[in-house]
Amino acid sequence: MEYYLTEERLGELKTELEQLKSKARLEVAERLKRAKELGDLSENAEYAEAREEQNRVESRIEELEQIIKNSVIIKRESAKKAAAVDIGSTVEVAKEGKQFRFFIGGRSETKPEAGFISNESPLGNGLLGHKVGDSIVVKTPTGEARYKITKIE
């Protein structure tokens, strides 16, 4: 599986991975050590919580390593030259008289409140391949929504 990321997001994920591998692992190891010193592990809530945290940290490390290994960098410059919406495009759309601006990225780029949507989201996927002037209909939990593409960068 490929993960579409901007250079900035890839850097953020690498930083998070490094922090988890160094600081978080050490903190969890220290918590486990302290909890073991309390005695009977079968009834030791602190030990159980530390093990859960260890599992969470290790799962996230594994997830980040997979994302980084399979990342595809989104090149914003090439998207500017495209006539149709693609991953890396910034798209302006009109919906019910209101203008919205979205950057189409991968699932790790998603921040809808900031205008970053995934190519896998209903709207992001619906916009892919369309041109300025095209209208699309997107199925949402509350029904269908119609968008008209007014600009692609």
Image (cartoon, grey):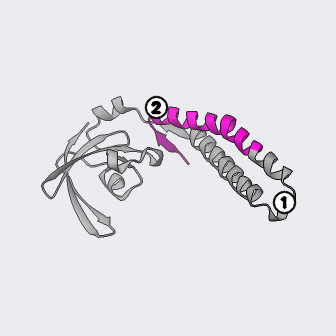
Q: Amino acid at mark 2?
A: Glu
Rendered position, 126 above or below 82: below
What is the secondary structure assignment of the residue under circle 2? helix
Residue bearing mark 2? 7
Residue in the picture at 74% in, 56% down: 46
What is the secondary structure assignment of the residue under circle 1? helix
| Residue 14 shown left or right of residue 27 in the figure | left
Residue in the picture at 74% in, 47% down: 31
Residues packed near mark 1 inside 10 Å, few (<14), some (14 to 19) or many (20 plus): few
Give the farthest residue toward the front: 38
| Residue 39 shown left or right of residue 72 in the figure | right
Rendered position, 133 above or below 96: above
Residues packed near mark 2 inside 10 Å, few (<14), some (14 to 19) or many (20 plus): some
Residue in the picture at 87% in, 56% down: 39
Separation of residues labelled 1 and 2 (CA atoms): 44 Å
Residue bearing mark 1? 41
Quadrant of the rendered image containing residue 136: bottom left
The image shows residue 88 at horizontal and vertical percentages of: 36, 39
Most foreground residue, 10 or 60: 60
Q: Earlier in the sequence, mark 1 or mark 2?
A: 2
Quadrant of the rendered image containing residue 109: top left
Labels 1 and 2 touching (C-beta < 8 A): no
Rendered position, 103 above or below 41: above
The image shows residue 130 at horizontal and vertical percentages of: 27, 49
Magenta residues span: 1-30
The image shows residue 112 at horizontal and vertical percentages of: 35, 50
Based on the picture, tell me whether residue 44 belongs to the magenta stretch: no
Secondary structure predominantly adopted by residues drawn in magenta: helix
Marks 1 and 2: which is nearer the front? 1
Number of numbered tags placed on the structure image: 2
